[in-house]
Each structure stands twice: as structure tokens, then as C-alpha cells.
Image: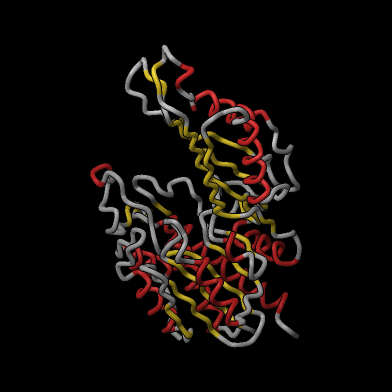
Amino acid sequence: MTALDPVLLTQDLIRRPSVTPADAGAMDVLQAALSGLGFTCRRMRFGEIENLYARYGTARPNLCFAGHTDVVPVGDAGAWSRDAFAADIVDEVLIGRGAVDMKSALAAFAAAAAKAIASGQAKGSISFLITGDEEGVATHGTKKVVEALMAEGEIIDHCVVGEPTSAESFGDMIKIGRRGSINVEIRVEGVQGHVAYPHRAANPVPVLIRLLERLQSRVLDEGYTDFQPSNLEVTTIDVGNPTTNLIPGLATARLNIRFNPAHTGAELADWIRREADAAAEGFPGRIELKPAISGEAFLTEQGPFTELVAAAVRDVTGREPELSTSGGTSDARFIRAMCPVVELGLVGKTMHSVDERAPVAEIRQLQAVYERLIARYFETFAPA
């Protein structure tokens, strides 16, 4: 059995500039490492996106690690202190796009799996569900893979997602749920005309303002168990009127709601439609809404699985991690259809930033936490 060095594997992954939707050979690097450990690997390509499902063993329970090889663009390359894809180590800190989000986690779990397999701890199955579409629109990645696996009858019992969940210090936070997200495009069509003759026009701007006021005046909730209150944010209002004496014929806006399990995306979309109808009462134009639900809120109830993950962090770091539902969305929103899921990874402060970086010592600590997690998992859930 070949041991894996998580730092060297992370460097190898970073050197593949896998900016969504490009793969640039990153999936090949990971597949080669897992194949060398005895994993059965399946490439699952949807559209232009490369995905990988790899499994060691056939028995249950099946502990899955989920993550992504794709990264966001570099931005201003000249602002980086090092080439963003060189994966240089400077003063024991690995610099590169994907160092935190989340190629280090891929490498750390692969190295941890290698140790577990070599020591005979894998009393069931270990699997990897990896996509190249997490940083993009996420239509041909984890969502498609989950749907395909479920259609085949594949069973995943529990899943750990390697997103960078730590807030200030490594191991201080684990994500046990996420808020849902709905984006809504609003288009109010009126009748263009001269400002001196408003009776010949139908101004869409007051209608849009009334609608946004109605939406923002509602307190969606006061919070939900383990969740902060839901919030609605208007992200843009556009009229595009270049002159002062013209009543525009069109006004548009976009908004986003991050919501807890007190709501569903469909319920919020229906509410917005009702408010739009009320705001447009007597208006001769029309309002068009385009809601897009990118994920529903979910919570993994605290119990044996969340406790063993927290215990693995305590074993290695001595910290008591906060079990949190804060932050944005992740691919955990798709995986939760198959099984309970938690998220555990490095400190996320530099993700998506210039000089994204991860201390080498923390990458190795993450491997150690994953090793303890795997050991505790099979001690807890594998048949005696």
C-alpha cells in the first residue's frame, strides 16, 4: 500500500489550473492517487464537467468524502506574490489557487484513507464524490452525480464535505447545515412616454418600488433552531434611463433570500408572486418574475455522527468546534438527499482571494483529523 503525502498531492493538484469548467488534468491526478490505493474509480461526465465517484470496498457502512477540484479565477495575476498555479511553499505556507478551497482537503482525506486502508480500519467502504462544477453554476456536477447514484441504488451512509469551514483557527467550526438560497429576477414592463404627459404612459418604477417595499417590510422569521434569521437582500435595481424627461418603459431588479428551514424555496416564490400581484393592482403593464432556487435549507441533527466528527477535531487540536449553519451554500445541499452530511475543512479566510494560502502544518493536521474521523466512524457504525 502506497502512503500519500497530502502536501505533495495538494501541490500536484494546484498545478492543474482547473478554473471552472476546465479540468486541466486535476481529476486525473486525484484518480491516479485513489486507484493506487485500490479504489474503483468511475468518471461521470455531464456536459463539459468532469466528475469522479470512487469507492474502496463494497460493504456498508459507506463513508463518503465529497469535494471539488475546480477553482475560481485568479483575478489580477500581477497582485499575487507567486504564480497562482506554481504551488510554491514560502515560510512553510503553501500559496496557490485552491490551497484552501479545497485541494488541500482532497489530498488530506486521500492520505487519511490510505492510512485507514493500510491499517485495516476500513470495516466497510470509503468513497469519494468529486466534482469539477462546484464553483460554477453547479448544474452538471454533484447534483447530477447524486441523481445518477440514487437511480442506480448506490447507498452512501454518511458524508463529510471538505469545504474550508474553520473561521479563525483550524478546527474551531464544523458546518452541520446550510441556509437555502433563492434568487429572483423582477421585470416590470410599463409604457414609455413623456414626463409632461403621464396619462399617456405607465411608469413601471413606482410599481417596482412598491413591490420591493412590501417584500422588505416583512420580517421573514426570528430564526430557527441552530439557524440565524432569514434575510432578503435587494442586489440591484436598474432602469437605464439616459434622460430626464422620459418615463421609462421598463424597470428591473434582482434579490436574494437566504432562508432557514422555516421556509421552502417554493413557498417564498409563491409569497413574492402574491406581493407582486398586490403591488401591480390597477397597473396596465405587467410584472414578470423569474425565481431560481439554488438550494433548500437543511440541518443534520446532532447525534452520533456529528459527535464523532467533533471528537476527531478534539482528539487532534484540543479544540471544541462550534457546530454551525452559517455562511453560504455548498454541494452539501445536494448530498443531503442521500445521507446525513457535515462539512469540515481548513480556515477559509483566504479562499477566493489573492495569495490564497494554507500553512503546511494545518494541511497535515487536517489529515490527522480525517484519520481520527475515519477510525471513529467505523468504530461507531461498522457491525461488530
Q: Is residue 78 visible?
A: yes
- Residue 168, image quadrant: top right
Q: How many marks?
A: 0
Q: Position of residue 139 (x, y in %)?
A: 47, 62
Instruction: Choose between 130 and 174: the one closer to the eye.
Output: 130
Between 79 and 362, the residue placed more toward the observer is 79
Left or right: where does residue 2 sit relative to residue 56? left
* Whole-percent x, y for residue 86 in the image: 27, 59
Identify the residue shown where x is 35% and y is 61%.
Answer: 21
Outermost residue on the top side: it is 196
Q: Is residue 83 left or right of residue 93?
A: left
Judged left or right of residue 107, residue 174 is right
Residue 236 to residue 86: above or below: above
As drawn, the residue found furthest toward the front would be 200
- In percent of width and height, residue 115 lies at 52, 78
Q: Nearer the viewer, residue 312 or 12?
A: 12
**Residue at horizontal 59 percent and vertical 85 percent from the top:** 120
Whole-percent x, y for residue 23 in the image: 33, 67
Is 28 situated above or below 136? Answer: below
Q: Where is the C terminus found, in terms of image quarters?
A: bottom right
- Residue at image position (48%, 63%) is 105
Colouring convention used in this rendered image of the protein: secondary structure
Is 182 left, or right, of 111 in this rendering? right
Q: Is residue 121 visible?
A: no
